[in-house]
Amino acid sequence: MNWIGWPMARVVFLFVSVAFFAIWIQVTISHYRQNFHHKAMWVPVVSAPIFSLLAILLAYYRLDWLLYLFSYLMWFGVVAGGIGFYFHFHGVGVRVGGYTMRNFLVGPPVVLPVLFSALSVLGLLAYYWR
């Protein structure tokens, strides 16, 4: 494989793929630990490996239909991360003591859904990079 001459968008697709795979591992462990008590917990567990697979495919094959599918799914990822942020932030607040620093430390990670959205935005930047 020759890395010389790879456009930046191609490198970003590769990075997005690896990052979504890493997030998938973390979110699966965390949501499994909570016994998937809310159906929305399945969204990042199912979507992250799909996002990762599409991004790795786009790093090697630049097919139009794959690009369009990736773009729609990245927009879905932005929205899903926003909804996840709401659930995580609300989850901190319903703990005993409400929105205290201790609950932010031991409760659901508020930043992880934001990271999910941010990676989706990075994927969109790679898509629109022309």
Image: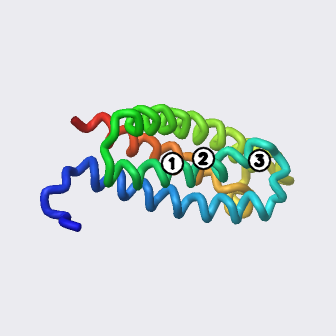
Q: Does residue 62 appear to the left or right of 113 in the view shown?
A: left
Tally of marks: 3
Distance, label 1 to label 3, CA atoms, is: 26 Å
Which x, y percent locates residue 27? 65, 58
Q: Residue at x 59, y 59 (%)?
A: 24
In the structure shown, which secondary structural element does the residue marked by tag 1 occupy?
helix
Q: Does residue 50 appear to the left or right of 38 in the view shown?
A: left
Distance, label 2 to label 1, CA atoms, is: 6 Å
Q: Which mark is residue 51?
A: 1
User: Mark 1 Cα within 10 Å, few/some/many (few <14, many 20+)?
Assistant: many
Q: Give the mark nearest the N terminus, 2 or 3.
A: 2
Q: Does residue 51 appear to the left or right of 35 in the view shown?
A: left
In the structure shown, which secondary structural element does the residue marked by tag 2 occupy?
helix
- Amino acid type at mark 1: Phe
User: Mark 2 Cα within 10 Å, few/some/many (few <14, many 20+)?
Assistant: some
Residue behind mark 3? 91
For this rendering, which residue is in front, 67 or 29?
67
Which of the image's four quarters has the N terminus?
A: bottom left
Q: Residue at x 46, y 59 (%)?
A: 19
- Amino acid type at mark 2: Ser
For this rendering, which residue is in front, 123 or 83?
123
Q: How is the image coloured?
A: rainbow
